[in-house]
Image (spheres, grey):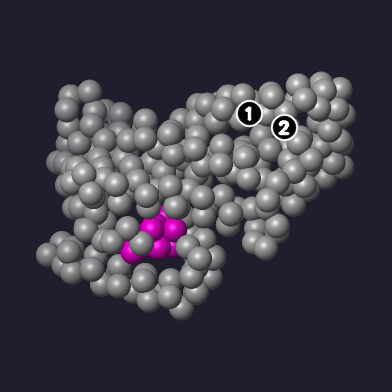
Amino acid sequence: MPADGAAGALTVGEGVTGAAARGAGARGNRTQDAQVRGRMAGQGLSRIDDTVLVREAQRGNRAAFEELVRHYDQAVLRLAMHFTGSDTEAQDIYQEAFLKAYRNISGFRFECSFYTWIYRIVANLCLDHIRKRQVRKEDAPVAVDHEGRTFDVLEQVADDRAAADPERDLMNRELSSRIQGALENLSPRERMVFELKHYHGLKLRTVGEILHTTEETAKNTLFRATQKLRGALADMR
């Protein structure tokens, strides 16, 4: 899915960058692309530094921005998927996040890392999505399979082995549903802090930077979220 998502985002990016390329001339873009490839070759098999890519992208280099997309496409799509529970909505957020990043890359001032910046864009889009959904009072964001059954997209993994245990599968599905329901009862900000810390493994200092707050505030928010989840799932201990 991340690969498909990346293709979709790059299609959007190419549409925008295409106009820029026509304005600057194809020869300029080919030169810029060659420069990036040269830097990448100089770094061997290691991942090219984000700072180099951002500076190249700020000069209008499409290849550099597409490389940034490849660095973070899976993380962005995973966060969007976990918050929306919908492949279509997650793809929409994914596309919008990288399109916003592309349009505003020239204004990036290196006051934080690029990954903090792109996470901030995605987090804000996800929070807006949740708030709009709560205003509309829609059902909890869970995916629906072809048989009409609901499941947590990230937690539910199909087991195709012949020896799969149907009872255990049912228990896992019920557990996932309970956890998803408990997460839905958190405030959007509490859930975002919990997701970024426990599902994406980010430090609280980074979470604070993403949400434009302090590490201490993020820590307190995480504590409240954890206490609420423990209370909601107390009977499962």
Secondary structure category for the residue under label 1: helix
Magenta residue check for 32: no
Secondary structure category for the residue under label 2: helix
Report whether 38 appears left or right of 92.
right
Report whether 202 appears left or right of 165.
right
**Res 150 → quadrant:** top left
Q: In the image shown, does 147 or 69 lie closer to the viewer?
A: 69
Report whether 99 appears left or right of 26.
left
Query: Does the rendering let one see residue 229?
Result: yes
- In this picture, is 197 found above or below 161? below
Question: Residue at (70%, 58%) from the top-left corner?
Answer: 110
Q: In the image shown, does 92 or 236 lie closer to the viewer?
A: 92
Q: Residues within 10 Å of mark 2 (few under 14, many from 20)?
A: many
For the magenta stretch, what is the residue range? 190-199
Q: Residue furthest left?
A: 235
Q: Which residue is mark 2?
A: 62
Please tell me the numbered disc located at residue 16.
1
